[in-house]
């Protein structure tokens, strides 16, 4: 009987867990059993590993093989365990040295010919390995840049299983894949240009590639002109609401007839948001790594993401889920960025209401029969909607052809509990000829972004020592405690609360917006006018800008 051991990482939601892969080769009828709660794609690794080992010169013996993934109670999914399973089996055959192998964590999928293929979730897997005390991580060469984003990781990229055997001190006796590439170099592609020597272990004198040194890959199509707020004609109140949303992290509803610029305004919002700090950039990059949408060649994601799902999307595509272990949806992909729902009135009501939890708590917990997963989802929600099915019920509504019941049904999809969590609700009215003929040019994105950056800096300084960085994240208890305003300043919003026109949540959100109004104006504390302006902007009232 022979026993081998290797290490891998299981990703559950956004959390990585180091998994002990044990391989036992014993006498008995030939069989290959994989235990430890594997999903279908992981169970299929038996055939991939057997073929890859055979084509790398070390065929598995015709004996009873048992591979255990420990802890057995932890659900495991995906093909990223292939490398660890192969290494454990090769260690059991004494092809590799067991003490050396157990210092490495292995992440990667195997092809039948022995090639190591890229997988999702390499960034959180590498982070989990480093935090677990295993800084040496073996990854596919295509995932090298992504793995090197983790500080403290010693990344060992491999192109084939033969490279991995050499890395651990073994000798592949029949490297068939390398022979094929030598005879037919055109088949190997860009990955074959790297020699196997690049997979050597990183020594003490080697310099690790840091996130700041990663640059976008050269080439590719030239970037087009970036959307600019100067393109928006008129709409001073909507522009001001956009600036408040960016400066304080407040959710925004743009309501108006077709062609007034709602989508145009929302598409300019990412440009006025500041860059992500290091902690947020790692969080966002990890989410996109798990979802398989990360371009690691550009380094950490520093710009706030922008997600714009179609109105036919389902609850699963919005908040995440799927069969087996859940996967992130659009809400998590918009973490620390913007989730824009254009034509919000056309979304299914249950899809919109599924956003209540992340709007309140900043994360999503999805439960399935095979386990639960937690995904971060602290985003800025922007809704754009027509006021009725025909779209012309705003203003005096003289051109609207919808019956009252149709209007109510259309707007009822935006439920009261959802709108109660939206801080800024603004009517976007048609642009007049006077607005188009105005000589004063509209402010550019760069000018507004500078004001937003200054306002966020003021809020961050005020909230120093707390877990919050902008006004939109501050809980009501802190507003009524450390940031309590006098009754003379809050009398308008207090009166709205007493009359039942505002909930206690709405009361708190008005105060949050008033602090952002004050920060943009360069004041130390909100005045009564600031609170009144915030109240009007919540109730689709008109304010002077």
Image (tube, helix red, strand yellow):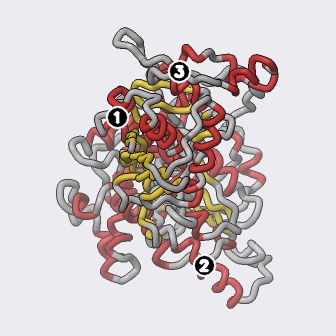
Label 2 SS: loop
Nearer the observer, 166 or 488: 166
- 22 or 373: which is nearer to us? 22
Task: Please rate how many residues cluster around mark 3, counting C-alpha atoms within 10 Å: few if below 14, some from 14 to 19, many from 20.
Answer: some
How far apart are labels 2 and 1 at the CA level? Answer: 46 Å
Q: Which residue is mark 2?
A: 413
Residue 234 left/right relative to 161: right
Q: CA distance from mark 2 to mark 3?
A: 65 Å
**Residue at horizontal 57%, vertical 50%?**
46
Q: Are marks 3 and 1 in contact (CB under 8 Å)?
A: no
| Earlier-in-chain disc, 3 versus 1 | 1
Q: Is residue 111 left or right of residue 283?
A: right
Residue for point 70% across, 77% down? 388
Q: Note whether residue 48 is visible.
A: yes
Query: What label does residue 171 carry, if any?
Result: 3
Toward which corner of the image does residue 382 lie, by quadrant? bottom right
Q: Which residue is mark 1?
A: 130
């Amino acid at each position: 009987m022979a026993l081998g051991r290797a290490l891998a990482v299981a990703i559950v939601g956004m959390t990585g867990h180091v998994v002990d892969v044990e391989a036992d080769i014993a006498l008995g009828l030939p069989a290959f059993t994989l235990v430890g709660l594997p999903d279908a794609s992981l169970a299929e690794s038996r055939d991939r590993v057997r073929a890859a080992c055979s084509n790398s010169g070390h065929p598995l013996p015709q004996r009873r093989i048992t591979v255990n993934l420990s802890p057995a109670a932890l659900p495991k999914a995906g093909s990223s365990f292939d490398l660890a399973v192969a290494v454990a089996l090769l260690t059991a055959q004494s092809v590799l040295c067991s003490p050396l192998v157990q210092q490495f964590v292995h992440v990667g999928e195997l092809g039948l010919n022995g090639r190591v293929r890229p997988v999702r979730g390499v960034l959180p897997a590498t982070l989990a390995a480093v935090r677990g005390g295993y800084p040496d991580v073996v990854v596919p060469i295509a995932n090298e840049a992504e793995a090197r984003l983790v500080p403290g990781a010693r990344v060992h990229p491999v192109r084939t299983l033969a490279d991995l055997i050499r890395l651990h001190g073994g000798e592949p006796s029949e490297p068939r894949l390398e022979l094929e590439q030598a005879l037919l170099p055109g088949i190997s592609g860009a990955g074959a240009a790297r020699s196997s020597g690049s997979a050597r272990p990183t020594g003490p004198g080697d310099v690790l590639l840091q996130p700041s040194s990663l640059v976008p890959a050269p080439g590719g199509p030239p970037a087009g002109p970036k959307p600019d707020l100067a393109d928006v004609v008129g709409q001073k109140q909507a522009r001001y609401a956009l600036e408040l949303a960016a400066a304080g992290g407040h959710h925004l509803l743009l309501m108006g007839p077709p062609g007034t610029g709602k989508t145009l305004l929302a598409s300019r919002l990412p440009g006025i948001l500041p860059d992500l700090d290091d902690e947020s950039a790692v969080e966002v990059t990890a989410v996109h790594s798990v979802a398989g949408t990360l371009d690691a060649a550009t380094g950490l994601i520093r710009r706030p993401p922008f997600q714009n799902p179609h109105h036919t999307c389902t609850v699963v595509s919005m908040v995440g889920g799927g069969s087996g272990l859940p996967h992130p949806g659009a809400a998590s992909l918009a973490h620390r960025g913007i989730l824009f729902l254009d034509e919000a009135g056309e979304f299914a009501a249950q899809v919109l209401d599924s956003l209540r939890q992340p709007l309140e708590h900043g994360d999503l917990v999805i439960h399935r029969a095979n386990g639960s997963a937690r995904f971060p989802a602290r985003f800025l929600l922007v809704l754009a909607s027509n006021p009725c099915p025909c779209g012309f019920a705003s203003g005096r509504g003289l051109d609207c052809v919808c019956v009252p019941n149709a209007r109510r049904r259309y707007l009822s999809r935006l439920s009261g509990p959802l709108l109660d969590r939206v801080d800024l609700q603004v009517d976007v009215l048609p642009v007049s000829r006077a607005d188009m003929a105005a000589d004063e040019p509209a402010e550019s994105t760069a000018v507004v972004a500078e004001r937003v950056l200054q306002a966020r800096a003021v809020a961050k300084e005020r909230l120093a020592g707390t877990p919050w960085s902008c006004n939109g994240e501050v809980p009501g208890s802190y507003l009524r405690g450390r940031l309590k305003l006098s009754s003379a300043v809050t009398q308008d919003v207090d009166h709205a609360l007493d009359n039942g026109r505002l909930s206690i949540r709405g009361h708190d959100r008005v105060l949050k917006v008033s602090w952002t109004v004050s920060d943009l104006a360069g004041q130390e504390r909100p005045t009564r006018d600031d609170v009144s302006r915030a109240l009007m902007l919540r109730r689709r009232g008109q304010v002077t800008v």
